[in-house]
Amino acid sequence: MRVAGAAGRGLIVPAHPKHGVASSAVIVGGGIGGLACAVALRRAGLSVSIVEQAPAFEEVGAGLQLSPNATRVLRDLGVLPTLEENAIAPEALEIRDGHSGRIIASCPYGPAAVRLGAPFLVAHRADLHRVLAEAARALDCTFEMGARLEGMEASDGVAVAVANRDGEALPIQADILIGADGVRSTVRAQLGGSAAPVFAGRVAYRATIPAIAEGRPAVRLYLGPEAHLVTYPVRGGATVNIVAVVKADRPVTRWSEPGEASAVHAAFAMWAEEVQALLAGAPEFRCWGLYDLDPLPRWGAGRATLLGDAAHAMLPFLAQGAAQAIEDAAALAAALAQGPSAEAALRAYEAARRPRTARIQREARTSGAIYHLSGPARLARDAFIGLTGNRLLERYEWLYGG
Ligand SMILES: Cc1cc2nc3c(=O)[nH]c(=O)nc-3n(C[C@H](O)[C@H](O)[C@H](O)COP(=O)(O)OP(=O)(O)OC[C@H]3O[C@@H](n4cnc5c(N)ncnc54)[C@H](O)[C@@H]3O)c2cc1C
């Protein structure tokens, strides 16, 4: 196999004693999915190299809800105790009317967590990312930072990722290649996937503010016409995370653009005082365009596959994007232990994961539509949630049970 630009300067991810059907992996993308995958594969005995376009990891993102299907995997990966030092286990999910602040339904997390055998947590993305990066480093994963994947080859009994670092081609060879390179995945495009993420006509403004005394730790979801707001404590309770989602005509393509505070305040001007107080406490907002992807007909070919947002980017209305990337990591490691060949293991991983992630992609869309109802439909929704909301988590046991 020839790789353009390789010129003999490539790296070969060293093989570890064969554990399953692959002994080395190159992972493109060092986000939550890529790092969880690195830790899972390394613990399964593979050598791992991570190719990340950023020159260094930065504190991007804000809060993440981590449901038991994710925390169970994080515990298996050995990172949960360190994460829990800074994470919070909220006592309940409170669904509130955005305009009055009235609690429509309150759903306790405790009994569900006990039933499911793993906690509901909320954490800052940077804390989860750091814990995973430290675990990957402690396990001797190799990091190729400032290296952007531009080409790849994965059809000839071996996989090669060709990255560009400072204008130089950096080919990295391994038994398998995993594209964990996010919603605008280059690996997906290289594999022939023509799917393009679609702007969902909504943006999320995110901010973190110093904690304000506000009773029990809870995830609070405020619903209003054409908008909603989610808030919960992170960083050991020192900080409160705010996500405010509104309609938008103009697509926002960059991750984490500076957001206009005046636009956020205007969108929530008629909302409850407690919402206004939260927003007033934000020193700045970062803005995310929300993008949706239809379930893909296939995730991989040959010795390459996809993981996380690259495979199944979804709207954030079930708070499952990172959780599903973490689940992917465990499923991939399990499939590689089975065989009978690297290619067969990758196809088995995809077959195991595609139906579940597709269902979650679709349900996240539906949740978004329900959150933003207005007029009589909104009243009917609130009445229904009022009657059934305290059992909401039972309805999602297919999801949180993993
Ligand atoms: C408003 C909002 C709220 C959310 N809330 C939650 C929540 O509560 N719970 C939850 O589970 N999820 C949540 N999510 C979703 C979650 O943030 C994402 O699903 C998750 O971060 C995806 O991780 P990933 O590793 O697949 O991709 P990413 O985090 O996008 O990582 C991809 C990595 O690949 C790198 N990369 C890209 N291209 C290349 C290339 N060519 N070469 C090398 N490197 C490359 C990037 O630099 C990046 O580091 C939320 C998302 C949003 C927008």
Image (cartoon, rainbow, N blue to C red):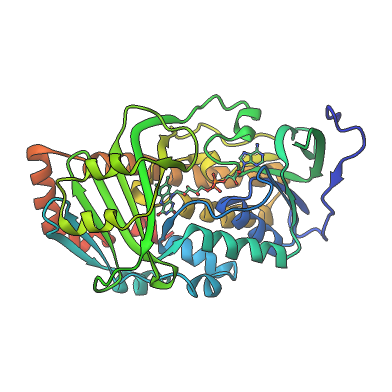
Q: Residue at x 27, y 58 (%)?
A: 278
Side of 132 relative to 215 (left or right):
right
**Whole-percent x, y for residue 16 in the image:** 82, 59
**Whole-percent x, y for residue 111 in the image:** 29, 73
Q: Residue at x 25, y 39 (%)?
A: 369
Q: Quadrant of the N terminus?
A: top right
**Whole-percent x, y for residue 144 in the image:** 75, 49
**345, 139: nearer the viewer:** 139
Q: Quadrant of residue 150?
A: top right
Side of 2 relative to 202 (left or right):
right
Q: Quadrant of the C terminus?
A: bottom left
* Relative to 95, residue 75 above or below: below
* Relative to 188, residue 396 above or below: below
* Relative to 383, residue 152 above or below: above
**Whole-percent x, y for residue 103 in the image:** 14, 61
Q: Quadrant of residue 198?
A: top left
Q: Is residue 8 among what the camera can see?
A: yes
